[in-house]
Amino acid sequence: MSLRFLTPPEDSIRAFEMAVTPTKGKLSGVDARLRERMRQTPTALPIYVLGLDSFERGDINDASLVGWHYVVADKAGNAGVDVYVDNKQTRHTFGAVNRGAIVDETVAQLSSAREDARYAEERDYEVRILRVPALYLVALWLKAYQAGHDRFVSVGPALSTLAAGSGHSWSELHQRLRMQAQARIRNDIPAKGQPGRRR
């Protein structure tokens, strides 16, 4: 088994490097040593977003690539930078700096995935991030090159029915959260921080 990390497009890398450049960057609160480490050795994970209706239907193939999450572990701390891409996959722009529990958990679960015997089968996985904003779900998506063997590891913020660090197949993840998806659709509950329903 091996975990495969894709190389982002050059325009995405340039947007990331601009974000961590001392004179023009967005990371003024990050220790200088960590900033330099991020420029040299980031781990880049493609970010996929799945809408609420698609999740409720169980259609993981509807997940869309929306950008790249650059994350690094360092003794000074963990930090991540999101660089988003437009619908035509041509324009890459800085999106957000991430620090704290979610980044820490992402780093921890990446380490566990490399070592955990559950993933020691003879399969290869492409490492992605899956976000379902309407359900507050952020997960490592271990996309298997062999169909039907994807794994999803929650990194938070954890829902009451899904503990951070828990690993599931797509069918298991869908089953665990489908009722929440149906309730949100039925009650037209807006996603956190959004003015209305987000699908």
Image: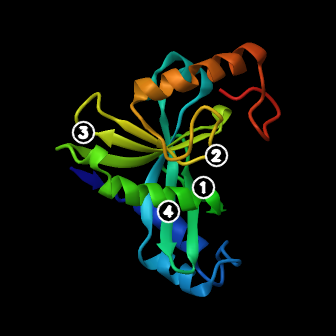
Q: Amino acid at mark 3?
A: Tyr
Q: Secondary structure at mark 1?
A: helix
Tell me the colour scheme of the image.
Answer: rainbow
Q: Which residue is mark 2?
A: 157
Q: Residue 97 appears in which quarter of the rendering?
A: bottom right
Q: Position of residue 181 (x, y in %)?
A: 63, 22
Residue 128, percent across and down? 42, 47
Query: From what the image shows, is residue 121 above or below residue 80?
Result: above
Q: Residues within 10 Å of mark 4 (few under 14, many from 20)?
A: many
Label pair 1/2, CB-CB below 8 angstroms: yes
**Which callout, 4 or 1, points to the residue nearer the camera?**
1
From this view, report whether residue 41 is shown above or below residue 187.
below
Image spot of residue 81 (x, y percent):
57, 63
Q: Which numbered marker is on residue 102?
A: 1
Name the residue beneath numbered marker 4.
70
Q: Residues within 10 Å of mark 3 (few under 14, many from 20)?
A: few
